[in-house]
Amino acid sequence: MNKKNIFQLRLVFKTILLLTLMLNFMLFTKAQSYSGYHASAYNGVYAILNSPADILNHRFKADFNLAGISTGISNNTIKFKYKNRKDDYGGTSWANPIIHSGKGYFNTDVFGPSVLIRLSDKNAFALTTRARVMTNIHGISTYILNSVLQDTIDASLINNNLAIRDMVINTHAWTEMAFTYSRQVAISDYGVWKAGVSLKYLSGMAAELFSTDKLSFTHDSVFDANTQRNKDAIFNTQGAVRLQYTKNLDTLGNDIFSFKNPGIGIDIGVSYEYRDEMQVYETVYSDRTASYIWKIGASITDIGFIRYGANETNGIIAQGLGNTYLMDNLTPPSDSSNIGQMSNYYQKLFNTKSGPSAFNMQLPTTLHLNYDRFFNKVLGINAQLNLPLVFSKLNYYSGTYNPFAVTITPRAEISWAGIYMPLSYNTVSGVQVGAALRLGPLVIGSSSFINARMLKTKTADIYFILRIPFFAYKAYKNKPFLESPSKLSKKQRMALDCPGK
């Protein structure tokens, strides 16, 4: 197989990926969001990202967020090393040959102007705005990966049946406006129970669903009667390819604030804080009791979905019936510059019809389990488990999801500064070590910074936050267990033979 044919094959599969990933890259704001800072005891309004119960934070009277941007890309195939960034491959490397199917995760989270207000020691609320883009990729066959990434194609792939059975690429972009309320619901001798809920008004911006169903074919050269020579082709195609998308992918900038596709979402959470001062007497909080010894919490975030109506969507299903396709024809012509034109080209090529088809995009519903421990007023550690709840069979799931992840974050912080080192594992990119710094109103961090600088990483991410925190503690005082008894009347004292006043 000559270099020209190899190049054509790469171009075909890059086109397939481009069709389904275009939305995510268009929305990147010119892993777990905000990893590291999520573990801060001074994260203020950002606490709602993991649990609405945690906004009742007695370190704040109020907290105002100006802007936060977190963006990241993860995969299980390509590694990057910063020290090698000037080599022929820009510091990237991968196995040769690749023997595991490909997975990927793209996440951009823009946290807009938001405010948290603590009404009292027992009540707090927050109003937040947020825009999110998420892409999940699953089941990219080793054939595609080796064809796209390697310099040569293994001869064993030629004239053999090749399968891309259950590849899925789902992308979703949406905005949120949320009202969050947190309340102290119970106390014990040394503990405080809190519960919280977020009600979210959702607006779907755009979505795309791409999947293969038992797709297989044979790759070899066939005789082309038009040119009277052999050309690369795939033949004996079986299975199906499905694509559904919103029609506005090419004009997305006009629909960011349109609220055309409304939805409702909800977050719920509960936490227990073990403190170093007695709570049974309703002790008023202070800087001493604000530093709990340990805390546990559980929450479920992003319960809900957004429905896209038939008038907003389009889609095609291409069924393989033993057809033969030249590789040259599988690459769309150069004048196909947008999703609609590419879709029309493939409709004609595969002799299939397209039409509107309403679909739901599930939110990335996730269970969070959290443990936080203070060693003193400066040093602490946080452990968190994130478990996706909603998807079952990935090739039939319409929505996005967070990967399974475990994060342990040691920290050192005071009211106006903090250093965090998140150590994480997720099912897409494996083990990562990052760092974050908080200084006054500014926060900067990355879940993969240390990996990228010193080791190799399969994740590239960064986030920035600018906020206005209002730190304020109440003076410490105790309330007596029993209030002073009310004064007795003269008749009552005589009846009780009580000499008191």
Image (cartoon, rainbow, N blue to C red):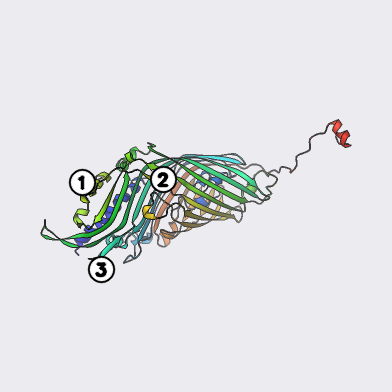
- Type of amino acid at the residue the image marks with label 3: Ser
Q: Which residue is mark 2?
A: 132
What residue do we see at 54% from left, 53% from top? Answer: 370
| Position in image of residue 173 (x %, y %) | 38, 45
For mark 3, give the secondary structure: helix
Q: CA distance from mark 2 to mark 1?
A: 31 Å
Q: Residue furthest bottom?
A: 156
Q: Quadrant of the N terminus?
A: bottom left
Q: In this figure, which residue is indicated by the disc labeled 1?
A: 335
Residue assigned mark 3: 156
Query: In terms of secondary structure, where does tag 1 sit?
Result: loop
Q: Is residue 134 left or right of residue 188?
A: left
Q: Say above or below: 236 vs 192.
A: below
> Is residue 249 among what the camera can see?
yes
Crowd tier of the residue under label 1, counting other residues whose Cα lies within 10 Å: few below 14, some 14–19, many 20 or above: few
Residue at the spot 67% in from the left edge and 49% down from the top edge: 188
Q: Quick one: label 3, few (<14), some, or many (20+) residues within 10 Å?
A: few
The amino acid marked with disc number 2 is Arg
Left or right: where does residue 359 sit relative to residue 124? left
User: Which one is in front, 50 or 34?
Assistant: 50
Relative to 233, 29 lies left or right: right
Q: Earlier in the sequence, mark 1 or mark 3?
A: 3
**Label pair 1/3, CB-CB below 8 angstroms:** no
Q: In the figure, residue 9 lies in which quadrant?
A: bottom left
Q: Residues within 10 Å of mark 2 (few under 14, many from 20)?
A: many
* Quadrant in which the C terminus is drawn: top right
Residue 498 in view (yes/no)? no
Q: Quadrant of residue 201?
A: top left
Residue at image coords 21%, 46%: 335
